[in-house]
C-alpha cells in the first residue's frame, strides 16, 4: 500500500507534514500556533502535542483538563513562545470543534460549496481572525485541493500566485521565499510615511 503523498510540506519533518496533510484538526492547530514563532516550528507543534497528550482527537483534547494541556505545552522544550496561552487556545479550539462539528474538523469545509461560508466558519474558530482564516482557506485550495470553487477571491491576496504565506509552501526552499516576501512587506510598511 502506497503512502499518502504529503501535500503540506511545511516543516521538513515527514511525520509532522503527513499529520498536517491527513488530519484537519492538526492543520487547524498548526495554523493557530503560527504567530510569534517561525512557521515551520508552529506547524511541527501538532505532532508534538499529539506525542505529549497521546492523541490529537479534538473530543479527547476538549475533555482533558485545561491545566493538563498547559502542562504539555510548557514542558521543556516549550511548544511555543507563549506556551500557556497557546495551550488554552488549542483547548478552546478542540472544545469548539467538538461542540460545533462533532469532533470532525474537516466538516468546516467538507461538502460546503460557498467559499464565503467556509471563510466565515474559519473566522468563528477561537484564535482565528480574518487573515488567519484567509490563509487557511488558501491552504485548503492550494495545498489540499478541497476548497470550494471561487476560494481564491475569498482568500484575498493569499489566493494569488506567489509565496505570500504558508499556503504557498510546496517543497524545499519555498518557506525561505515566504519569509523573504514577509520581510519585504514589513520593510515596505515601515517606509510608508505616517
Image: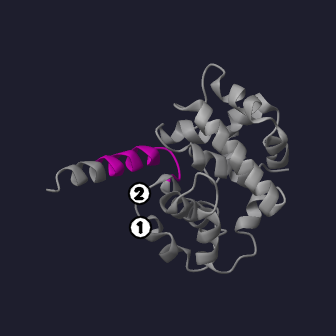
Badge 2, how many Cα within 10 Å: few under 14, some, many 20+? many
Q: Does any portion of residue 4 appear in the rendered image?
A: no
Side of 53 where 40 appears, left or right: left
Q: What element carries label 1?
A: helix
Q: Distance between the residues labelled 2 and 1?
A: 8 Å
Q: Where's the C terminus, which quadrant?
A: bottom left
Question: Residue at 58% of width from left, 49% of height from top?
Answer: 31
The disc, 2 or 1, on the residue closer to the chain's N-terminal end is 1
Residue under numbered circle 1: 157
Question: Residue at 76% of width from left, 29% of height from top?
Answer: 68
- Residue, far left: 193
Quadrant in which residue 128 is drawn:
bottom right
Q: Is mark 2 on a helix, strand or loop?
A: loop
C-beta proximity under 8 Å, tags 2 and 1: yes
Residue 164: numbered disc:
2
The front one of 121 and 8 is 121
Question: Residue at 65% of width from left, 52% of height from top?
Answer: 28
> Is residue 179 one of those drawn in magenta?
yes
Q: Where is residue 147 in the image (x, y as percent from the top left)?
A: 63, 71
Question: Which residues, given as a range, are shown in magenta?
Answer: 169-183
Badge 1, how many Cα within 10 Å: few under 14, some, many 20+? some
> Is residue 18 one of those drawn in magenta?
no
Side of 136 where 16 appears, left or right: right
Q: Does any portion of residue 183 appear in the rendered image?
A: yes
- Residue, far top: 76
Question: Most prominent secondary structure in the magenta stretch?
Answer: helix
Amino acid at each position: 500500500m502506497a503512502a499518502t503523498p504529503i501535500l503540506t510540506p511545511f516543516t521538513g519533518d515527514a511525520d509532522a507534514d503527513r499529520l498536517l496533510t491527513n488530519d484537519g484538526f492538526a492543520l487547524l492547530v498548526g495554523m493557530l500556533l503560527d504567530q510569534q514563532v517561525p512557521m515551520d516550528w508552529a506547524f511541527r507543534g501538532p505532532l508534538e502535542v499529539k506525542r505529549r497528550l497521546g492523541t490529537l482527537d479534538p473530543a479527547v483534547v476538549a475533555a482533558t483538563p485545561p491545566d493538563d494541556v498547559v502542562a504539555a505545552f510548557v514542558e521543556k522544550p516549550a511548544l511555543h513562545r507563549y506556551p500557556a496561552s497557546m495551550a488554552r487556545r488549542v483547548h478552546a479550539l478542540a472544545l469548539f470543534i467538538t461542540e460545533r462539528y462533532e469532533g470532525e474538523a474537516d466538516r468546516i469545509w467538507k461538502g460546503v460549496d460557498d467559499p464565503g461560508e467556509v471563510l466565515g466558519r474559519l473566522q468563528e474558530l477561537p484564535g482565528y481572525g480574518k487573515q488567519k482564516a484567509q490563509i487557511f482557506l488558501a491552504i485548503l485550495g492550494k495545498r489540499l485541493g478541497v476548497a470550494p470553487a471561487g476560494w481564491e477571491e475569498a482568500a484575498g491576496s493569499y489566493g494569488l500566485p506567489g509565496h505570500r504565506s504558508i499556503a504557498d509552501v510546496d517543497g524545499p526552499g519555498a518557506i525561505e521565499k515566504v519569509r523573504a516576501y514577509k520581510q519585504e512587506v514589513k520593510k515596505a510598511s515601515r517606509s510608508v510615511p505616517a
